[in-house]
Image (cartoon, rainbow, N blue to C red):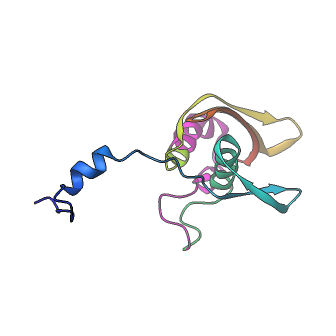
Amino acid sequence: MAEELDEGLLLEDAIEDEEIIDEPTKTYRVFNNRIAGNTNDLEAVAQAIDKILNTERFAYPIYSDNYGIEFETLIGQDYDLVNAEIERIVTEALSADERVIDIADLKLEKIADQKDSATLLFTVNTVYGQLNYEGVIEV
């Protein structure tokens, strides 16, 4: 049964009529490893993506089981297996953030002089626009 407000309106009717307000994320802007104010929108999403991709899933009890990425499962694996699994792992990790729509153009490139590392490149489509990601992972 719907909850009734003092004015005799149903709570669910009031929620439907209420305008949705886009609250700022209150994400700190980090510049040269120092906090330099706050940021929102695309810059805040970029920071969240970087944090997700640099946090190993299940390794830190402070984070929920839905947060982070499972790169450790790829370490020491054959490059072809890593290449086959990386898109699924990245997509799964970033899907925890509701601002991320999808990822595209994912490429994993071996680094010539580093046997156990590869460059990871992809585009992230977010509700605020596109971001290009480039990072190095251990394989």
Left or right: 19 with respect to 92?
A: left
Q: Position of residue 62 (x, y in %)?
A: 56, 73
- Residue sitting at x 64%, y 51%: 48
Q: Is residue 26 magenta?
A: no
19 or 87, which is in the foreground?
19
**Residue lying furthest top:** 105
Bounds of the magenta segment:
62-91
94, above or below 8, in the image:
above
Left or right: 23 with respect to 31?
A: left
116, above or below 59, in the image:
above
69 or 46, which is in the foreground?
46
**Residue lying furthest left:** 1
Q: Position of residue 97 (x, y in %)?
A: 52, 48
**Residue lying furthest front:** 7
Q: Position of residue 43 (x, y in %)?
A: 71, 44
30, above or below 108, in the image:
below
Left or right: 63 with respect to 78?
A: left
State which quadrant residue 134 falls in: top right
- Residue sitting at x 20%, y 60%: 7
Q: How many marks?
A: 0
State which quadrant residue 133 falls in: top right
81 or 60, which is in the foreground?
60
59, above or below 79, in the image:
below
State which quadrant residue 94 falls in: top right
Q: Position of residue 112 (x, y in %)?
A: 86, 35
Q: Is residue 66 magenta?
A: yes
- Residue sitting at x 64%, y 58%: 26
